[in-house]
Amino acid sequence: MDSFQARFYDSSGSSPDLVQVQVASGKIIVAGTAFGIAFEDLKLQVGGHDGDRFKLICEQKNVAIVSEDRRLLTAIANAAGGTELGKQAAQAEHRIVKRGTYNARYWSIVVGSICALAIAGYLLLDPLSAAVATKIDPSFEIKLGEMLARTEKLDKTSESYKRVARIGNQLVSKLEKSPYKFQFFVKKDREINACAYPGGILIVNSALIDKADDDEELAGVIAHEIGHVIHRHTLKQALHNCGLITCLSIISGGVGTGADTEKLEAALALAQKLESLNFSRSQETDADITGLELEVKSGFRGDGLIQFFRRLEKQESTLGKGGAVVFALLSTHPMSAERAARIEEELKRLKKLHAD
């Protein structure tokens, strides 16, 4: 019987177990155990950075199985036949295959077409947005962030705010030669999320604070967002979303006046809400590493971010589709197995370095 690698989440709250699962007659079992879940008790969801990660959720037993092995979908589709799970697995596999085929066909056609100039312009967006960001002085960036964040209505007095500010200031005190004066705010919002605005304004939603088990988890999230500010990721991504024309206009005309600020603010606001930006894998890695360094230097354990995300993933899996609305942080900063492994490896290195 074929085995497939997966992560197993249960209701204990502990980190997921790396397991091998098998597709048996009418159920999925965890290899080497007597634990099994009948097909009719399972629901399937697809997600992940590339749309190739899927979850098998059993609400009755409050467990979930997460995998990126497409062979498992094939095995389920074959074994579950005409059942609802079998149909979901077949559809998911079809979408994944279709997406890969579509992407390959799309790029083949575009590269060979008269749209080569447009493609070149698109490919230039990343370096162009980075170039624009370097032209924006940090003092201008701070002013821009204050205009975009609209902090006048945010919480700056509650105990939650004091907790966030205490942790945030403890972290930024270990920064060296930062041009930003970091400010921390709390927003009353049911979404579990946090975001960083250009110039060092960090906003943590009240739902995230309530969900964090301890200061370690909260420090992990805040340190990560500080990392995005240090690397100017929010500014670069927002500029990228503004498009080629906006970037070229800023480069050719320069920025610095009040009118420039208003124009750039309008462009960034129209491009996309900053709290819903999706960062690239390399940007997430940079923010992870910078955040980890700050945590370790500040006396935190450093494993809070992974611990928090793994617990959120497990809780989201029990809620099904409704969880996506609440657990916004998982959508904007998905924690893949590779990302978690990189964080854990870097944490080991940093702890060893500071121990020496």
Image (spheres, rainbow, N blue to C red):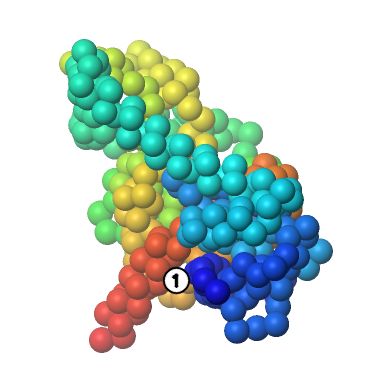
Closer-to-camera residue (60/35): 35
In the rendered image of this protein, does residue 124 appear above or below residue 245?
below
Q: Quadrant of residue 64?
A: bottom right
Q: Is residue 171 visible?
A: no
Q: Position of residue 275 (x, y in %)?
A: 52, 38
Q: Is residue 346 left or right of residue 169?
A: left
Looking at the image, which residue is at 55% across and 74% down?
Answer: 1
Give amino acid for label 1.
Answer: Gly
In the rendered image of this protein, does residue 70 appear above or below residue 261?
below
Crowd rating for badge 1 (residues with CA inside 10 Å; few <14, some 14–19, many 20+): many
In the rendered image of this protein, does residue 123 appear above or below residue 323?
above
Q: Quadrant of residue 218?
A: bottom right
Most extreme residue toward the bottom is 356
Looking at the image, which residue is at 44% across and 23% down?
Answer: 271
Q: Is residue 313 left or right of residue 348?
A: right
Most extreme residue toward the right is 60
Q: Position of residue 5 (x, y in %)?
A: 50, 69
Q: Position of residue 219 (x, y in %)?
A: 51, 63
Looking at the image, which residue is at 33% across and 21% down?
Answer: 243
Q: Quadrant of the C terminus?
A: bottom left
In the rendered image of this protein, does residue 274 appear above or below residue 118?
below
Q: Position of residue 50 (x, y in %)?
A: 44, 45
Q: Quadrant of residue 245?
A: top left
Task: Return the residue at label 1.
Answer: 302
